[in-house]
Image: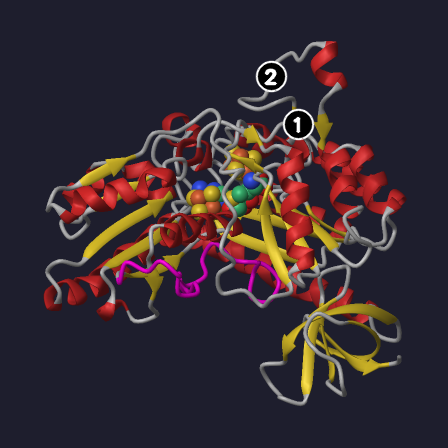
Amino acid sequence: MHEEKEIDETKQGEALMLEKPENGNGKKLFLESYGCAMNFSDSEIVASILKDKGFSTTQDFFEADVIFVNTCAIREGAEQRVRKRLTEYRKAKKTNPDLIIGVLGCMAERLKSQFLEEEKLVDIVVGPDAYRSLPELIEIAETGQKAVNVLLSKEETYADIAPVRLGSNGVTAFISITRGCDNMCAFCVVPFTRGRERSRDPETIVNEAKELFEQGYKEVTLLGQNVDSYLWTGGGLKKENPSAEELAGATTFAQLLEKVALVNPDLRVRFSTSHPKDMGDDVLYMIAKYDNICKYVHLPVQSGNSRILEMMNRGYTREWYLNRIAAIRRIIPEAAISMDIITGFCSETEEEHKDTLSLMEEVKYEFGYMFAYSERPKTLAERKYKDDVPAEVKSRRLAEIVDLQLKHSALRTKEGVGKVHRVLVEGVSKKSKEELFGRNSQNTVVVFPKKDYKKGDYVNVLVTDCTGGTLIGKSID
Ligand code: SAH
Ligand code: SF4
Ligand code: F3S
């Protein structure tokens, strides 16, 4: 998700394209996404809904009839980026006064109709659970009125909508398995922007994976804010105390992983995000059982100090977290592990920051995604605690954590040298047309000479060298 690995919440927006529909209405859509993989996956649902209504897409917003921007609210910086982008759309509105501008996603849900007051050029505000109403909202906006739908749902999973794969490499794809989040981490805006947690019917997930494989895709990433919490008991909100009968017919995340792994041994399965409080050994044994379930666990820790974790309402201590790391190492010894960390959360002392550094030393993560704490309106932390760590302290602590992670990433990457890695090719290397790049099971990027290989092939690569986070080698088949 970050760069070639994962989509970063802070990544610049991307204009997404869909093929021209057969029953075109002549109207052009410019669709851009910010935020996490879930947002990119949602944009594929939005594209599907609008394609059905005859829209085609453009990569030039000056020729668009409708501009949609799918937004992120996770940190203040993410929102500022969207606001800046809106000022650029303003230029297009000057040349085309009929242009409709819609704001989708988490920032839309957070600000609701207040968005219309703050940003006069916006015509439509729509939250993540209301995308089915987009055609209607466009019709309202076409009459010159403003249109808002920010209703959150207890059932919506868009399970019946076949996403249009946008900006795709034709090899890897996302599949949403849950929506929303019930966790209420004190710093986090997601429960407010995406509502309550709902699991999606496993049959529709497996069918989507099958269709993707038939279309030539070789890897799916199952997406949820907390995949371990996935539980299908027939739909709607997660049951507090499911009856024995309900549980007997239920599907857990471990069982879902198995169902998707069984679609085909040549379809790789990834998943994100695991939650330390809910990730059980059953999930780890399932990862170990199937070669095509990737040996990679993204396990955000946020802090290495139990007092801060308690304040964050994460539901685990440092010891619990390290016990989960030990379980991964025991059950899947070859697994790569990555994390998210927040520095400078309310009242964090220097000692507590050092606990985060020492936890990193213990784990030596392969990758990490690190952020300075950004206070979000309405969250528990905003209401209960003071955002009292000075900005310069936050960023100094962040720099220390980033430096240490760079060291660990380099160390872990080096461990891959001298070994053979099974690589799924995703495309031609950015640096040289004569080289391909892909990832190994552990999610590390591997670059090697092209020969006759192509996108979508599995290639055994003997790694002979590395730079920072990338492995370099030669095919041996
Ligand atoms: N559901 C995932 C996280 C989704 S948000 C989980 O529980 O792990 C992705 C990451 O953004 C979080 O893991 C956290 O590290 C970071 N983040 C979330 N809210 C933040 C805030 N207010 N300030 C800084 N970073 C934040
Ligand atoms: Fe936010 Fe916590 Fe839910 Fe992750 S688990 S989305 S950090 S509330
Ligand atoms: Fe951002 Fe919403 Fe994802 S706040 S990180 S786009 S769930």
Could you tell me which quadrant the N terminus lies in?
bottom right
Residue pictured at 53% horizontal, 55% vertical: 398
Element marked by disc 1: strand
For marks 1 and 2 on the same chain, the one whose residue lies earlier in the sequence: 1
The vertical placement of 232 against 267, above or below, is above
Residue 266 on image: x %, y %: 79, 59
Amino acid type of the residue that numbered disc 2 sits on in the rendered structure: Lys
In the rendered image, the vertical position of residue 436 relative to residue 93, given as above or below: below
Tag count in the figure?
2
Q: Residue at x 29, y 48 (%)?
A: 103
Magenta-highlighted residues:
1-26
Whether disc 2's CB lies below 8 Å from ligand 2 is answered no
Tell me: 341 left or right of 383.
right
Pointer 1 and pointer 2: residues touching (CB < 8 Å)? Answer: yes
Ligand 3 placement by image quarter: top left
Q: Is residue 246 left or right of residue 177?
A: right
Colour convention of the picture = secondary structure
Q: Residue at x 23, y 69 (%)?
A: 63
Q: Which residue corresponds to mark 2?
A: 239
Residue 13 painted magenta: yes
Q: Position of residue 450 (x, y in %)?
A: 73, 85
State the image coordinates of residue 379 (x, y, percent, origin top left). Answer: 40, 31
- The rendered magenta stretch, by its main secondary structure, is classed as loop
Where residue 231 is drawn, which disc sits there? 1
Crowd band around label 1 with a 10 angstrom C-alpha radius: few (<14), some (14–19), many (20+): many
